[in-house]
Image (tube, helix red, strand yellow):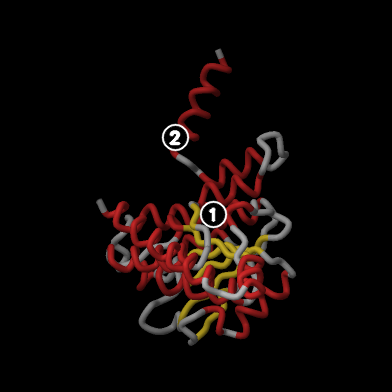
């Protein structure tokens, strides 16, 4: 039922956008079409992507209710590890980590040795000059975003970066929020803006591309998907006989 409401709201928003574009002059409509290309048709590339992790702080994570804290921690750490294995730059930022939201979760910082957490006061990470400079320094145009909360910490920089000309994606299961209404609002705004939503494993596998890639075994190990681990164990067991 909840999914149907989300889809109905999204379809209504897209229909409204389509109607608005029809009423534009021909030249303006052409410009809108050119700038609203379907990002779902563009694959993520390890050579053009950067991973932005926003506010995975112990205080914020403790309030997450749309998923379990255990699953959220697992997914964001797995995504970070896979990105590093694939050579994708990882940028981590936190809102005033010495204040009420606390430090970045230790599991994440342990998975990213040498990666400095960028402390900021701006709510929208894109508005922080140090965060934006770190992204620009990579020279990459695809930004994979995950954050707590989904509708603010992940969505705000994704929306702002898209407006600035970047190809942004939000990783749903490496993000989290505090109730169903916030999750619905965040998803509707992202989809209405044409920002694809993905999951942690799909994002990494999309960048991996081939199971014959020399890094494939390590990437799948980083992702630590329970069913895949079980299949691997079964295969190993039969192989040894």
Location of residue 81 in the rendering, given as x and y in whole percent from the top left corner? 58, 54
SS class, disc 2:
helix
Q: How many numbered circles does the render carry?
A: 2
Q: Residue at x 39, y 61 (%)?
A: 10
**Who is closer to the viewer here, 124 or 42?**
42
What label sits on residue 6 in the rendered view? none
Q: Is residue 168 visible?
A: yes
Location of residue 61 in the rendering, given as x and y in whole percent from the top left corner? 36, 67
Residue at mark 1 to residue at mark 2: CA–CA distance: 17 Å
SS class, disc 1:
helix
Q: Residue at x 43, y 62 (%)?
A: 15
Q: Are marks 1 and 2 in contact (CB under 8 Å)?
A: no
Q: Residues within 10 Å of mark 1 (few under 14, many from 20)?
A: many
Q: Is residue 184 left or right of residue 92?
A: left
Examine the rendered structure and indicate whether residue 41 appears above or below residue 137.
above
Q: Residues within 10 Å of mark 2 (few under 14, many from 20)?
A: few
Examine the rendered structure and indicate whether residue 149 appears above or below residue 133.
above
Location of residue 192 in the rendering, given as x and y in whole percent from the top left corner? 46, 66
**Who is closer to the viewer here, 204 or 101?**
204
Q: Is residue 113 visible?
A: no
Q: Residue at x 62, y 52 (%)?
A: 41
The quarter in which the C terminus is drawn is top right
Q: Earlier in the sequence, mark 1 or mark 2?
A: 1
Looking at this view, name the residue that lies furthest to the left.
1
Location of residue 230 in the rendering, given as x and y in whole percent from the top left corner? 46, 31
Examine the rendered structure and indicate whether residue 131 appears above or below residue 41.
below
Looking at this view, name the residue that lies furthest to the top.
241
What label sits on residue 79 in the rendered view? 1
Q: Residue at x 53, y 65 (%)?
A: 145
Q: Is residue 50 left or right of residue 222?
A: right
Q: Is residue 85 left or right of residue 187?
A: right
Say which residue label 2 marks. 227
């Amino acid at each position: 039922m909840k999914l149907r409401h989300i889809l109905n709201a999204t379809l209504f928003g897209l229909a409204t956008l389509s109607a608005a574009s029809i009423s534009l002059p021909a030249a303006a409509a052409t410009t809108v079409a050119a700038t609203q290309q379907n990002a779902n048709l563009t694959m993520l590339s390890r050579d053009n992507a950067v991973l932005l992790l926003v506010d995975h702080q112990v205080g914020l994570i403790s309030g997450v209710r749309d998923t379990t804290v255990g699953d959220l921690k697992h997914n964001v750490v797995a995504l970070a590890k896979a990105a590093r294995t694939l050579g994708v730059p990882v940028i981590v930022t936190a809102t005033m980590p010495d204040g009420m939201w606390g430090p970045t979760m230790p599991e994440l910082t342990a998975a990213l040795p040498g990666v400095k957490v960028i402390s900021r006061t701006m709510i929208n990470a894109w508005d922080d000059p140090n965060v934006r400079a770190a992204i620009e320094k990579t020279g990459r145009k695809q930004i994979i975003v995950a954050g707590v909360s989904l509708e603010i910490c992940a969505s705000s920089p994704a929306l702002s970066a898209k407006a600035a000309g970047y190809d942004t994606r939000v990783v749903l299961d490496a993000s989290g929020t505090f109730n169903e209404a916030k999750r619905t609002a965040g998803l509707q705004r992202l989809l209405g803006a044409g920002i694809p939503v993905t999951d942690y494993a799909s994002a990494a596998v999309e960048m991996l591309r081939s199971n014959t890639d020399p890094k494939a075994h390590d990437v799948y190990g980083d992702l630590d998907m329970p069913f895949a681990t079980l299949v691997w164990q079964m295969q190993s067991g039969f192989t040894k006989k």
